[in-house]
Image (cartoon, rainbow, N blue to C red):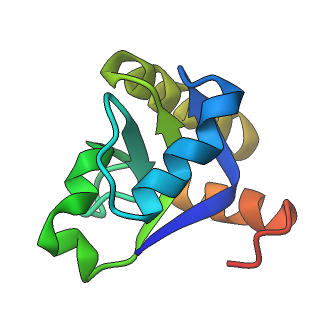
Amino acid sequence: MVVWKEALYVAGIPEKRQKRIMKSIEKKRPVKDVYLLTAPSNEENCLEYVKANQMLQPYYRKREVVVYGLAGGEAAAQELAAAMLCDTYLATGNFRVIPHLDRKSSEAGDGA
């Protein structure tokens, strides 16, 4: 299951296509050249980005994946991850990205 954070970072995707892409991912449909920025599976890392089509694999169907960013292409995903790291460091003085983004989403009305 994919959970979209309220304070979602987006890069390289026109605003008109965002909702359509998100719905396709939720309905387990393939999308072309889209990356998701998620919490890392290894707690020593700050973020993780994966191709959205990986969510079609059985492993991800059994897990809840919280998405903090959506990017159109690998280069956009890398730039977006860097921007998220910079935002976190400027706001908190450290690189604990996920707690910062969770707090930011709660303030935006996410509730999760």
* Residue at 51% from the left image edge and 40% from the top image edge: 70
Q: Position of residue 20 (x, y in %)?
A: 57, 44
In the depicted structure, whether residue 53 falls above or below residue 9: below
Count the marks.
Answer: 0
Left or right placement of residue 7 versus residue 39 in this view:
right
Q: Position of residue 29 (x, y in %)?
A: 33, 54
Q: Position of residue 57 (x, y in %)?
A: 15, 64
Looking at the image, the residue that sits furthest to the bottom is: 62
* Residue at 45% from the left image edge and 53% from the top image edge: 24
Closest to the observer: 112 or 34? 34
> Can I make out residue 42 in this image?
no
> Can I make out residue 76 in this image?
yes
* Residue at 53% from the left image edge and 51% from the top image edge: 22
Rendering quarter of residue 88: top right
Q: Position of residue 16 (x, y in %)?
A: 69, 30
Rendering quarter of residue 56: bottom left
Closest to the observer: 109 or 53? 53
**Image quadrant containing the N terminus:** bottom left
In the depicted structure, whether residue 61 falls above or below residue 48: below
**Image quadrant containing the C terminus:** bottom right
* Residue at 40% from the left image edge and 45% from the top image edge: 36
Looking at the image, the residue that sits furthest to the left is: 58
Left or right placement of residue 10 versus residue 26 in this view:
right
Left or right placement of residue 19 versus residue 26 in this view:
right
In the depicted structure, whether residue 45 falls above or below residue 79: below
Left or right placement of residue 51 versus residue 71 in this view:
left
Closest to the observer: 5 or 13? 13
